[in-house]
Amino acid sequence: MRKRFSGSLLRSSLLSCLLVIAGSAWLSGCSTVEGAGKDLQKAGEAISGAARNASS
């Protein structure tokens, strides 16, 4: 009976660790995508500015 409890505890600990790792990866991915979006927005603004200057 003790071995069964130990296996259940191990499985629960492993699942908790995997959830923490997956959550961390998901949160860091959100930050990365947000930063990439801001970079693309700035690049688009620079291109628009260059196009305005070229047409003037």
Image (tube, grey):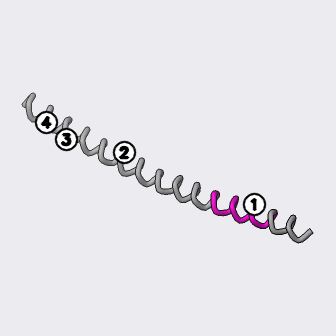
Q: Residues within 10 Å of mark 4 (few under 14, many from 20)?
A: few
Where is the N terminus found, in terms of image quarters? bottom right
Closer to viewer: mark 2 or mark 1: 1
Answer with mark 3 or mark 2, whichever residue precedes in sequence: 2
Q: Is mark 2 on a helix, strand or loop?
A: helix
The amino acid type found where label 1 is placed reads Arg
Q: Distance between the residues labelled 4 and 1?
A: 58 Å
Residue to which mark 1 is pinned: 11
Q: How crowded is mark 2: few (under 14 residues within 10 Å), some or many (20 or more)?
A: few
- What x and y, as percent, mark residue 49? 16, 38
Give the magenta range.
Answer: 8-18
Residue to which mark 2 is pinned: 37
Q: Is mark 1 on a helix, strand or loop?
A: helix
Q: Distance between the residues labelled 4 and 2?
A: 20 Å
Q: What element carries label 3?
A: helix
Q: Do the residues bearing badges 4 and 3 touch, measured as CB atoms within 8 Å?
A: yes
Front position in the image: 54 or 23: 23
Res 3 quadrant in image: bottom right
Q: Distance between the residues labelled 4 and 3?
A: 6 Å
Q: Distance between the residues labelled 1 and 3?
A: 52 Å
The amino acid type found where label 3 is placed reads Ala
Which residue occupies 53% across, 52% down? 26
Residue to which mark 3 is pinned: 46
- What x and y, as percent, mark residue 44? 26, 38
Closer to viewer: mark 4 or mark 1: 1
